[in-house]
Image: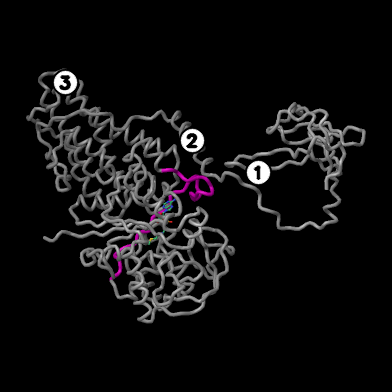
Amino acid sequence: MEQKKFYITTPIYYPSDKLHIGHTYCTVATDAMARYKRLTGCDVMFLTGTDEHGQKIETKAKEAGVTPQQFVDRIVEGEKGVKDLWKLMNISNDRFIRTTDGYHVKAVQRIFRKMYDNGDIYKGAYKGKYCTPCESFWTESQLVDGKCPDCGRPVQDAEEEAYFFRLSKYADRVRHLLEDTDFLQPRSRVNEMVNNFIKPGLEDLCVSRTSFTWGVPVDFDPGHVVYVWVDALFNYMTALGYENDEHDDLARYWPADVHIVGKEIVRFHSIIWPAMLMSVGEPLPRHVYGHGWLVFNGGKMSKSLGNVVDPYLLAERYGVDTLRFFLLRTFPFGSDGNFSNELLINTINVDLANCLGNLVSRTTAMVEKYFGGTLPAEREDDKADCELKKLACALRDRYEAEMEKLQFQNALAEIFKVLDRANKYIDENAPWVLAKDEGKKIRLATVMYNLLETVRICTTLLLPFMPESCEKIFAAIGACPCCRGWEKANQWGALRADATVAKGEVLFPRIDAEKELAELAAIQEAQKKAALPAVEVDPLAEETVDFDTFCKCDLRAVKVKACEAVKKSDKLLKFTLDDGSGADRIILSGIRKFYEPEQLIGKTVAAIVNLPPRKMMGQLSCGMLLSAVHKEKGEEKLQLMLVDDAIPAGAKLC
Ligand code: MSP
């Protein structure tokens, strides 16, 4: 029988910033699916890569003072870059495509020309709105409150000569694909696409740009570069050899079985991508799966909000497998999931330390203690064990049903039901009591074997999620390679009757939650600070003030005669000032957190002296001291505006 093929892809990532836990989630999920398919015996092609063109990269490179190519090289290939992260996370991709790879660039040029030659790409003028961070064109009607409907940021007016793709021509076929087939999953995404994009009417899509150069040049019209999404989407085929000689796997793997993508890019994958494939006459992928986002405290993770969760930190602290497991055990793949440190630590303790880790270590420890590490081969046939055996043998089918729907959370829940049952089985059978009775040795060996077999089956099915830990568990329970496969995962008795265990290291140590959460929060706070801009100043005021109004401000040099903290206030300092009038002037200023009162005595500072007096904490303040304010790494900084001490009190500042 011919081996079943399975072609699966992740989105190709924008190397504009370091990747975070959200990107890791998407890639780990795809990896688990690819490993699962390999486990079941499929010939798998798993593709990932990077989407390296576009205005955003060009702008970022300019800011960094390097060429766009140098910029993307660093983020893709450099230390803690994209490739490094996938290596760390044990991602088993078979191929990695960069859209700057020469063969891809040439292929995109050919594809563009093909669609131009068949009349689906034509030249026109583009007028509309462009969201630079998202690299997306929008029509006026698609904007939400005048802003980008994806990211909520301001959009710019754009008008230029451009090429258009006849997306409108394919509207009916795409609608049929979405509504009448299982192309787009989960089903809830179909309504989003049809209601938001198809029903309002599909307009032709602008597919070239002239206002920047970092893209695939349109070879028959210099000055135009191909729209980054056209360039990016075709990666799924060029990586197999479409329109190039670099690879030769198109016939073997295309059409893709599933493109895994985040919800915000479902539009590109379920509308634009099939329409372009229809245009070039190629078969459509079988499925697109739009997963949810990992959010942080309910909000989108973003560098500018300083709430991105660093996968390197978590993997270093808890282990790669633990992180992989947590991501897929905790959040339903089709919907958004709210990341929190509490959830992470709780999952580690409950599932990995208490349930799986404990089961493996208790079982192997007892086999060592009661049998010196090797079970005797005799068994007792006891009906009481039936429930555990039945449950374990039926697990593979239930797991498979969930994995086929990409419901990783449910598949793992099925495994943990069996592991929980096995832990209960230990308590029910109390091996430590059986061990006291020489006549119950065979019963004890039977109980131990049933536990090892249950662990073997569960571990086989956990392989796609925690590949390295599963190898350690197999070694611990004495499972040789021939009893680890998919075909043995629904069969009882594959493990040798006289199995020898090897109690190893503690696989998943229990974590002191309170202590760990405090440490983690402190580290993440420090990371957040480090990611903030070094220096931040308020934007300049847009509103003008007329000269006469400005001149009404009476600005003076004043000398600090006395300064003290205001009782019961943690903000205010009370200044007694010489303003040159002969009478003392009192000003209260909310700068206590920046100065010790005695530091300021004798200094000459700037003040506005004709503001109406104001009562604060029961005291009258007559004026305001001027300060310079800005932020450093998110922290407020303030310095009083000091005036040269040679300037006499009362001198007018103008
Ligand atoms: N370059 C495009 C994809 C082109 S595919 C032909 C792109 N890149 S991206 O780097 O911005 O995002 C890559 C993937 O990461 C997307 O599927 C996106 O949904 C996913 N995620 C980014 N942040 C995420 C979360 N916070 N949570 C889950 N997935 C998230 O889009």
* SS for dot 1: strand
Q: Which mark is residue 435?
A: 3
Q: Nearer the viewer, mark 2 or mark 3?
A: 2
Q: Name the one closer to the observer, 578 or 120.
A: 578
Q: What residue type is labelled 2?
A: Ala
Q: Residue 630 carries which label?
A: 1
Ligand 1's quadrant is: bottom left
Q: Which tag, 1 or 3, sits closer to the chain's start?
A: 3
- 639 lies above or below 105: above
In the displayed structure image, the side of residue 371 where residue 226 appears, left or right: right
Q: Which tag, 2 or 3, sits closer to the chain's start?
A: 3
In the rendered image, residue 327, in percent from the top left (x then y), is placed at 37, 45
- Labels 2 & 3 near each other (Cβ < 8 A): no
Q: What residue type is labelled 1?
A: His
**Alpha carbon separation for disc pair 2 and 3:** 47 Å
In the displayed structure image, the side of residue 413 where residue 431 appears, left or right: left
In the displayed structure image, the side of residue 541 where residue 182 appears, left or right: left
Q: Which mark is residue 343?
A: none
Is residue 451 visible from the viewing direction of this image? no
User: On the image, which quarter does residue 489 sit in?
Assistant: top left
Q: Nearer the viewer, mark 2 or mark 1?
A: 1
Q: Name the residue under label 2.
A: 521
* SS for dot 3: loop
Q: Is residue 304 magenta?
A: yes
Name the main secondary structure of what is drawn in magenta. Answer: loop
Q: Which residue lies furthest to the front in this view?
A: 646
Q: Name the one closer to the observer, 83 or 375.
A: 83
Q: Which residue lies furthest to the right in this view?
A: 582
Q: Give the range drawn in magenta.
A: 283-310
In the rendered image, residue 159, in percent from the top left (x then y), is placed at 55, 73
**Alpha carbon separation for disc pair 2 and 1:** 26 Å
